[in-house]
Image (cartoon, grey):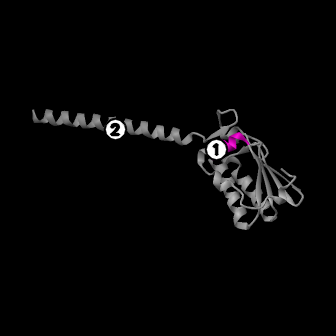
Amino acid sequence: MAKELRAGKKSQTVKKTAAKVVQLAAKKKMVRKAAAKKPRVITQDDGFIEAGTIQNAVLTTAEERGCRIVRFGSSCTLQEAAALRSALLAELDMRKPMLLDACAVAAVDTAGVQMLVDLAIECMERGLAFRWKGRSAVVEHAIGALGVGALLESPGSVDQFAGLV
């Protein structure tokens, strides 16, 4: 009888171990699925699209009346962050006041807003005046949602931008 009890305990232990292995496998599968999801992007149509589906110009620049006019493309996301950063650093190196136009931005994510904040801070640190010509509703919504509006305000004079806005 003692052998039967030990055999019964062993089979119960094996069953419990097998159940735990199945549970762990299910958890690992869920974690892999969650990690494979692409980041979401806020778009103008108040819906969401996957970050990889946006392909547009990143940045266009021009110079007028001694000011650099910087126009952002329709996407300002993590996907474009490296290209945007290098283009913006080149603009900052010109050491001229910047008029920033984000009216065409149709998709933005947290990385894009963070890059805009970094740009504003870098302008202030370098003593460069900047001003926003405009920001799309999507950009305004993202800025409001992240609570960084005050960081994007230009403390500089706006006299040099007269007639450009």
In the orientation shown, which residue stands out farthest toward the right? 65
Label 1, residues with CA under 10 Å away: few <14, some 14-19, many ≥20? some
Q: Residue at x 69, y 55 (%)?
A: 153
Q: What's the magenta region?
A: 136-143
Left or right of residue 147, residue 31 in this image: left
Relative height, residue 95 to residue 1 (above, below): below
Q: Quadrant of residue 90?
A: bottom right
Determine the residue positioned at 25% across, 37% down.
13
Picture coordinates of residue 38, whole percent (x, y):
60, 40
Q: Is residue 137 magenta?
A: yes
Q: State the predominant SS element of the stretch in magenta.
A: helix
Disc number for residue 20: 2
Q: Which residue is mark 1?
A: 142
Amino acid bearing label 2? Lys
Q: Earlier in the sequence, mark 1 or mark 2?
A: 2
Q: Which mark is residue 33?
A: none
| Residue in the foreground of this view, choosing between 97 and 12 | 97
- Looking at the image, which residue is at 71% across and 60% down? 155
Question: Residue 88: x and y, percent?
Answer: 76, 57
Q: CA distance from mark 1 to mark 2?
A: 43 Å
User: In the picture, which quadrant includes the N terminus?
Assistant: top left
Mark 1 falls on what kind of element?
helix
Tag 2 secondary structure: helix
How crowded pointer 2 is (Cα within 10 Å; few <14, some 14-19, many 20+) is rated as few
Q: Inspect the magenta stretch and tell me whether residue 141 lies in it.
A: yes
- Indicate which label's residue lies in the foreground, 1 or 2: 1
Above or below, 42 relative to 71? above
Where is residue 157 drawn, in percent x and y? 78, 61
Kind of residue at disc 1:
Ala
